[in-house]
Image: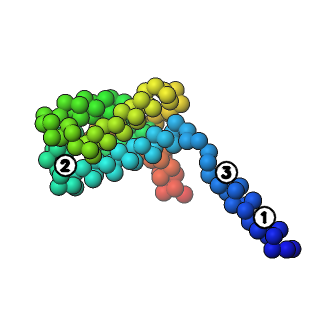
Amino acid sequence: MSAQTRLVSFIFILALIWFASCAPPTCYSRSLVLSKEITRALDTIHKSSRTKTCAEFLPKMFLDVHNSCIRSKLRDFLYVTENLPTEYCRERPRIRLLKRRVQILYSIITRFCYRDLEFSTNDCEALETGNISPRYAEDRLKHLIEDA
């Protein structure tokens, strides 16, 4: 096999790999990615010295796109970010970016993917505390494993 044939084969394989990873995001994958970005942004806002005072006004939020309460939690969070008590907090770039991401996630969940997402839990408290109660199927699986 000549060097030219190997090079063409190598380029072809690289092109296949590149095209395979270019699949468009689904509603579910996009909402998962956005929820992780929002969680990271909130963590950064709470830790940064420039936005720490503004973070005191923001409610705690642990996002779980499998929780049906996420719509109301995002709506409430948007209300708080739009009505922050000081202009300084409303104009901070990190706060504005967080607000934009929450708006996008809220639009995806309530409009674009309204019937595509499936909620497996209805624990509104878990979105505030981060303590997610085990799902019935997982709990049952644990008992089946223990019994075996």
Q: Which residue is mark 3?
A: 19
Q: SS at mark 2?
A: loop
Q: Is residue 56 above or below residue 114?
A: below
Q: State the residue at coordinates (43%, 27%).
A: 110
**What residue is rendered at 52% in x and 26% in y?**
115
For marks 2 and 1 on the same chain, the one whose residue lies earlier in the sequence: 1
Residue of label 1: 8
Residue 55 in the figure: left or right of residue 26: left
Q: Which residue is mark 2?
A: 51
State which mark lies toward you, 2 or 1.
Answer: 1
**Secondary structure under the numbered disc 1 in the rendered image:** helix
Q: Is residue 66 left or right of residue 8?
A: left
Of the image marks 1 and 3, the number of the one nearer the N terminus: 1
How dense is the environment of label 3, judged by Cα within 10 Å: few (below 14), some, or many (20 and up)?
Answer: few
Q: Quick check: can you spot residue 71? A: yes
Q: Residues within 10 Å of mark 2 (few under 14, many from 20)?
A: some
Q: Secondary structure at mark 3?
A: helix
State the residue in front, 64 or 24: 24
Spatial CA distance of label 1 from label 3 is 16 Å
Residue nearest the observer in this picture, 74 or 121? 74
The amino acid type of the residue labelled 2 equals Thr
Instruction: Estimate the x, y position of residue 121 in percent, counting from the top left.
Output: 41, 36
Identify whether 42 is placed above or below 148.
above
Q: Amino acid at mark 3?
A: Phe
Pick the residue in front: 26 or 67: 26
